[in-house]
Image: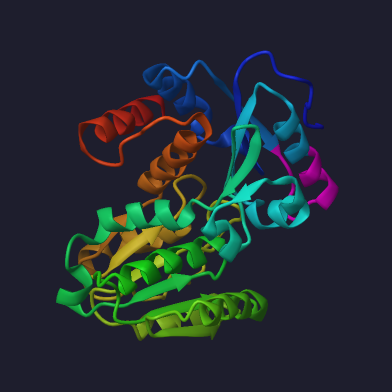
């Protein structure tokens, strides 16, 4: 069904994705809007992955020109959308410029603004998993399965943390099914003088990912950043893959068949695993963009954040 670009009569925020109607945000946003006093509604715009560039330009032009369209969160299309419509933006934040993606569309003083929020939101979610001093005390490494935008964003967060003397993994390993994404990530890292030792591994098959994971140090964090389990069925691993002893396991997704999560749970007791899904990442991802779109302060910790999380859990 074609998207509706008629002028809106109420303040509206959009979710630009693939299957937006299945997302918990459609139930969560009304609760948050009431809690924050936003007087706004949310609508989804669905596009197939890697859609016609003109379709991305249409939605960006609509948001830019419709007074009641306040902004949007962009998921799957954040790279393609910005590539197709960069000239329509009046401002891009430094992350958006470096990563060449826009996950947040907002307006300020009549100008259309694009932000790449994932380095911030993935970092907030990561810190809830590892805790203070985890990497230094354990010597653990980070394995990113998938070299797409979410993995690159997390490495950007760790770059800044390392440069500020913060606690970071002793080594990062990134795997991907195709060489292209690995080369794109390598090029970005070279351009910014990435300070953490990092290996890029071409792994076209799940069995190859299993082998790489088998070489990670005890306590290492394994992340499913492939989209498999949500955007497509399956897992980047086979059932025979062995997670690091006393390791951390992070599934970026919170909905879908989540086979990767099931594989980790099957080994949880035997390997002493700590397993986390993408729910906190979801909360941070949406609240950071909502704060930008509506120019409101939303806490990232403490009682205010706990209340936001409670409302989301109840609505979910």
Magenta region, residue range: 46-58
Determine whether 175 is above or below 249 in the image.
below
Quarter of the figure with the N terminus: top right
Q: Position of residue 256 (x, y in %)?
A: 52, 47
Q: Nearer the viewer, residue 237 or 174?
A: 174
* Magenta-drawn stretch contains 225: no
Q: Position of residue 169 (x, y in %)?
A: 30, 75
- The answer to whether any part of residue 262 appears in the image is no
Question: Residue at the spot x=42%, y=21% of the render?
Answer: 31
**Would you identify the image quadrant in which residue 97 lies?**
bottom right
Q: Position of residue 166 (x, y in %)?
A: 25, 69
**Would you identify the image quadrant in which residue 154 lies?**
bottom left
User: Is 314 displayed left or right of 104 in the figure?
Assistant: left
**Would you identify the image quadrant in which residue 251 lies?**
bottom left
Determine whether 171 is above or below 243 in the image.
below
Q: Nearer the viewer, residue 24 or 187?
A: 187
Q: Nearer the viewer, residue 257 or 56?
A: 56
């Amino acid at each position: 069904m074609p998207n509706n670009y008629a002028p809106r009569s109420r303040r509206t925020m959009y979710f630009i994705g693939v299957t937006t109607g299945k997302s918990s945000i459609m139930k969560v946003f009304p609760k948050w809007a009431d809690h924050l006093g936003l007087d706004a509604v949310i609508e989804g715009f669905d596009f197939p992955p890697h859609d016609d560039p003109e379709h991305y330009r249409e939605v960006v032009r609509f948001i830019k020109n419709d007074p009641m369209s306040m902004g949007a969160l962009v998921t799957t299309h954040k790279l393609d959308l910005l590539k197709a419509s960069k000239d329509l933006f009046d401002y891009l934040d430094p992350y958006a410029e470096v990563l060449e993606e826009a996950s947040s569309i907002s307006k300020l003083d009549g100008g259309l603004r694009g932000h790449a929020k994932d380095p911030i939101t993935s970092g907030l979610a990561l810190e809830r998993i590892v805790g203070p001093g985890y990497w230094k005390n354990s010597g653990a490494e980070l394995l990113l399965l998938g070299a797409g935008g979410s993995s690159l964003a997390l490495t950007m967060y760790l770059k800044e943390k390392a440069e500020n003397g913060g606690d970071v993994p002793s080594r990062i390993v990134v795997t991907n099914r195709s060489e292209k994404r690995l080369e794109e990530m390598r090029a970005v890292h070279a351009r910014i003088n990435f300070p953490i030792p990092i290996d890029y591994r071409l792994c076209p098959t799940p069995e190859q990912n299993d082998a790489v994971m088998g070489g990670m140090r005890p306590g290492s964090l394994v992340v499913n950043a492939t989209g498999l389990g949500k955007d497509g069925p399956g897992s980047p691993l086979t059932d025979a893959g062995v997670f690091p002893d006393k390791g951390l396991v992070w599934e970026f997704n919170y909905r879908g068949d989540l086979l990767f999560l099931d594989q980790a749970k099957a080994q949880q007791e035997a390997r002493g695993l700590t397993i986390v899904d993408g729910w906190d990442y979801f909360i941070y991802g949406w609240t950071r963009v909502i704060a930008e779109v509506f120019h409101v302060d939303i806490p990232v910790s403490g009682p205010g954040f706990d209340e936001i999380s409670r409302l989301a859990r109840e609505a979910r």
